[in-house]
Image (tube, grey):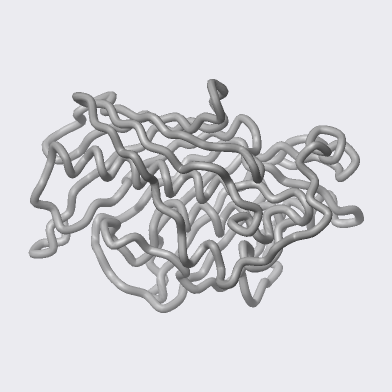
């Protein structure tokens, strides 16, 4: 149920065991994050591809909503590089009526595995989705001038207090959610994930200056509900552990009012350009 410009996968190909293969170009990489692709973008493409794999294998006769509720991403290399295109794979490991799970990989143009992911979904029929979220329906969509996933709104009002940080995203605008979902614009979890990264990287730079780039070796993110147009989102985070020299564990939450809509736990590691280690 996701469409362009959120879904930019190309050349989809059915594989053995119900897997799906696709090609994708990198659309967004923050200057602070080590390439060739950021973790949240990998999560975006693998979550979309995984929903297609589940839909083809189990729900292909009817349209459904596949809401990613938990994802674990692991970056397999600290090496910083560049790639023009990537190959994504997704294989279903659980396919039931109301839930599913996939395993996925993102490979760079040299066929080296960049990220692996496990993504869990809550699966909803259109009737159930409408029942839950009918108050957020928009009959007229206002498309963005350019892809909101290429040109992104950043966090504001960053406040540091010891090992803690808070920031605002502000009110979600429908055009910022284009393609996710039609007539029910909701901020994608992958965008929330990248805002978590921005929050954690800002915290990291405060305590560990001197690194050219940062990466997230491992991320575990949960989504408890969708955040729709008209709702205002705020972020809070903290350093929950100093793992080793130059590596920290960040725990953070995204909130609408007092309600937690998403939470994350992710590692942040600084990388220097002279050795890319």
162 vs 14: above or below: above
Residue drawn at x 40%, y 52% is 154
| Residue 254 horizontal side relative to residue 162, left or right | right
**Callout count:** 0
Is residue 146 at all visible to an observer of this figure?
yes
The location of residue 111, given as percent across then percent down, is 41, 71
Between 263 and 103, the one nearer to me in the picture? 263
Asked where in the image residue 77 lies, by quadrant, the reply is bottom left
Asked whether, in this view, residue 32 is left or right of residue 23, the answer is left
- In the image, residue 275 lies at what x, y percent? 10, 62
- Quarter containing the N terminus: bottom right
Q: Is residue 38 above or below residue 99?
A: below
Given residues 242 and 209, the one toward you in this image is: 209
Does residue 96 show up?
A: no
Q: Is residue 88 above or below residue 98?
A: below
Q: Residue at x 41, y 70 (%)?
A: 108
| Left or right of 183 in this view: 205 | left
Q: Residue at x 28, y 62 (%)?
A: 31
Residues 111 and 81: in front is 81
- State which quadrant residue 10 falls in: bottom right
- At x 46%, y 59%, the residue is 152
User: In the rendered image of this protein, does residue 111 appear above or below residue 99?
Assistant: below
Residue 7 point in image, percent of width and height: 63, 64
Outermost top residue:
258
Quadrant into which the C terminus falls: bottom left
């Amino acid at each position: 149920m996701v469409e362009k410009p959120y879904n930019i996968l190309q050349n989809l190909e059915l594989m053995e065991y119900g897997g799906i293969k696709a090609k994708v170009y990198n659309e967004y990489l923050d200057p602070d994050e080590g390439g060739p692709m950021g973790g949240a973008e990998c999560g975006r493409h693998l979550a979309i591809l995984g929903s297609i794999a589940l839909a083809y294998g189990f729900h292909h006769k009817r349209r459904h909503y596949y809401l990613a509720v938990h994802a674990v991403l692991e970056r397999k290399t600290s090496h910083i590089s560049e790639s023009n295109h990537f190959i994504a794979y997704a294989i279903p490991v659980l396919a039931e009526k109301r839930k599913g799970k996939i395993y996925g990989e993102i490979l760079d143009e040299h066929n080296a595995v960049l990220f692996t992911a496990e993504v869990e979904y809550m699966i909803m029929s259109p009737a159930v989705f409408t029942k839950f979220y009918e108050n957020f329906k928009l009959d007229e969509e206002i498309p963005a001038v350019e892809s909101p996933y290429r040109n992104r709104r950043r966090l504001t009002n960053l406040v540091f207090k010891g090992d803690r940080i808070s920031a605002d995203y502000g009110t979600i605008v429908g055009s910022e959610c284009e393609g996710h979902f039609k007539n029910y614009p909701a901020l994608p979890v992958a965008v929330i994930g990248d805002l978590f990264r921005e929050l954690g990287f800002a915290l990291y730079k405060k305590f560990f200056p001197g690194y050219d780039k940062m990466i997230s070796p491992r991320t575990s993110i949960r989504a408890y509900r969708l955040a729709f147009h008209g709702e205002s989102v705020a972020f809070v985070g903290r350093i929950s552990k100093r793992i080793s020299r130059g590596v920290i564990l960040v725990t953070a939450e995204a909130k609408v009012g007092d309600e937690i809509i998403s939470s994350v736990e992710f590692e942040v590691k600084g990388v220097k350009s002279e050795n890319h280690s």
